[in-house]
Image: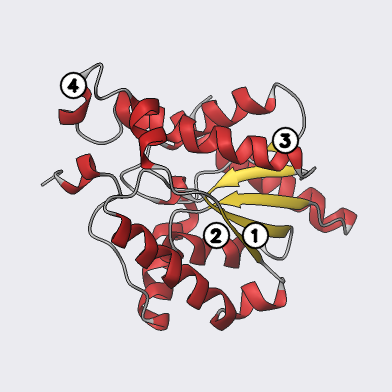
Amino acid sequence: MAKSIYQKELDELLSSLEKSGKKPSLLLHACCGPCSSYVIEYLTGFFDITILYYNPNIYPQEEYERRLAELEAFLPRFSPAVLGKVKLVKDEYLPDHFYQAVGTDREPELAREPEKGERCRRCYEFRLKRAYQYAAAHEFDYFCTTLSISPFKDAEKINVIGECLASQGSPKWLPSDFKKKSGFLRSLQLSEEYGLYRQQYCGCVFSMQRD
């Protein structure tokens, strides 16, 4: 499916929800406060949102904790999150699970890949699997991730993984490319407005070495 279709599908779904007056539950995997900001603002009128903070890829642990603390402090200050009663679930931080999933010990060449390659695809899959499992166990209607808002993330790969997971059964995958409609720009504006800490790398030790 062409990347442009994901936004069209989302637009059609949101229009349908608006007409129906229904507000289904959405488990939104999030990597940080800045990436969450626009997505919450965009979706909270249509979904009952619970954020899942599951990011064992983040290195070092101090960075992981800083991003979590920023997200926790941001949500009570952000009116769309407050009005939408957005909830936050904090999952385990087990970095070894990330390294096993991406397989850089078995295929060391992956550690040197630029972003959007196979290592990143495996990381998307690793975190989205956990989001799907949590959403299924807690009977959410939909699941999704904020990851596609980043220019360094491949929205097509993210959506293909999400669709594949959803094919196993409920919950449904929410198609998205949150960079569209100036989503990334809006996240920058919200970050500046709320004084949010914006990290200079995606999260893992390999992306830290990007430059």
Residue 209, how many percent across, how many down?
Answer: 14, 44
Nearer to us: label 4 or label 2:
4
Nearer to us: label 1 or label 3:
3
Query: Which of the two labelled residues, at mark 2 and mark 3, occupies the earlier sequence position?
Result: 2
Hey, what amino acid is under mark 3? Lys
Residue drawn at 48 percent across, 68 percent down: 71
Hey, what amino acid is under mark 4? Pro
Local SS, label 1: helix
Q: Which mark is residue 108?
A: 4
Say which of 196 and 42 sits in front: 196
Q: Is residue 130 above or below residue 190?
A: above
Local SS, label 2: helix
Report which residue position mark 2 lands on. Answer: 39
Discs 2, 1 touching: Cβ within 8 Å: yes
Label 2 and label 3: CA atoms lie apart by 18 Å
Quarter-wise, where is residue 128 in the image? top right
Relative side of 100 to 140, left or right:
left
Query: Which of the two labelled residues, at mark 4 and mark 3, occupies the earlier sequence position?
Result: 4
Relative side of 52 to 178, left or right:
right
Residue drawn at 25 percent across, 36 percent down: 115
Q: Residue furthest top?
A: 106
Residue 17, how many percent across, how many down?
Answer: 81, 52
Report which residue position mark 1 lands on. Answer: 43
Report which residue position mark 3 lands on. Answer: 172
Determine crowd level at label 4: few under 14, some 14-19, many 20+ residues with C-alpha closer than 10 A.
few
Residue 178, how many percent across, how many down?
Answer: 49, 50
Say which of 69 and 78 sits in front: 69
